[in-house]
Image: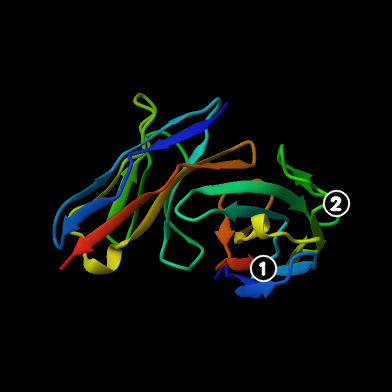
Amino acid sequence: GAVVSQHPSRVICKSGTSVKIECRSLDFQATTMFWYRQFPKQSLMLMATSNEGSKATYEQGVEKDKFLINHASLTLSTLTVTSAHPEDSSFYICSASGEVGTDTQYFGPGTRLTVL
Amino acid sequence: GDSVTQMEGPVTLSEEAFLTINCTYTATGYPSLFWYVQYPGEGLQLLLKATKADDKGSNKGFEATYRKETTSFHLEKGSVQVSDSAVYFCSLTGGFKTIFGAGTRLFVKA
């Protein structure tokens, strides 16, 4: 149980284009989803927290107009990197948390974005 | 603010050696503590957790005890295998925010 998927697993795009990454909880309802960014050989940095049906809460320094997050249902959240640039190349990982009050997060397998 | 500090890697061990990866934390309140493992090119997998002082989390031969008096949550395994080679992250969750340590890379040689 508690499986989280991400799609796509890898994406290569041209500079200036937008890329959408999907995060799905497959066997549970995720009241909260988190988006992280991980640079090579570094830890995860929380980008934003989203609750179903409400606006995402972004961490300091994360541009909300560049990284659009939508949490339209209890099983799906999307991250759209708008007008991507090479410095946006990174490993993006989502996680999902189930019942309200639980603090265990279940992580997706990650999406490697390369912007040329 | 809250923080997590892990021992720097990489840690290189021979198969069947004893493993300890140190993790200490600072936090207000009473956070839950976690260890995650990340294999190359993959996301994080929950390895074990502890939600209150003196709790011991254990899984797949790994264990860690929530020590409030020393604010520590050290990861241990009695006999590592080559397949344990990965990056291990210590983290805490408090107030619905999760903070990760920098990660410790483990190499196990046959």
Q: Which of marks 1 and 2 is nearer the N terminus?
A: 2
The circle on residue A116 is 1
Which chain is mark 1 on? A
In this picture, residue B33 sits left or right of residue B83: right
Q: Position of residue A43 (x, y in %)?
A: 49, 48
Residue corresponding to mark 2: A54
Kind of residue indicated by mark 2? Ser
Q: In this view, does B47 lie above or below A48?
A: below
Q: Where is residue B49 in the image (x, y as percent from the top left)?
A: 43, 49
Q: Where is residue A55 in the image (x, y as percent from the top left)?
A: 85, 49
Q: Place residue B73 in its image quadrant.
A: top left
Tell me the residue at 42%/66% (across/down): B40
Q: Distance between the residues labelled 1 and 2?
A: 33 Å
The circle on residue B86 is none
For the residue pair B7 and A13, the one nearer the viewer reads as A13
Tell me the residue at 48%/43% (across/down): B91
Q: Which of marks 1 and 2 is in front?
A: 1
Q: For the C terminus of chain B, give its image quadrant.
A: bottom left
Q: For the N terminus of chain B, give its image quadrant.
A: top right
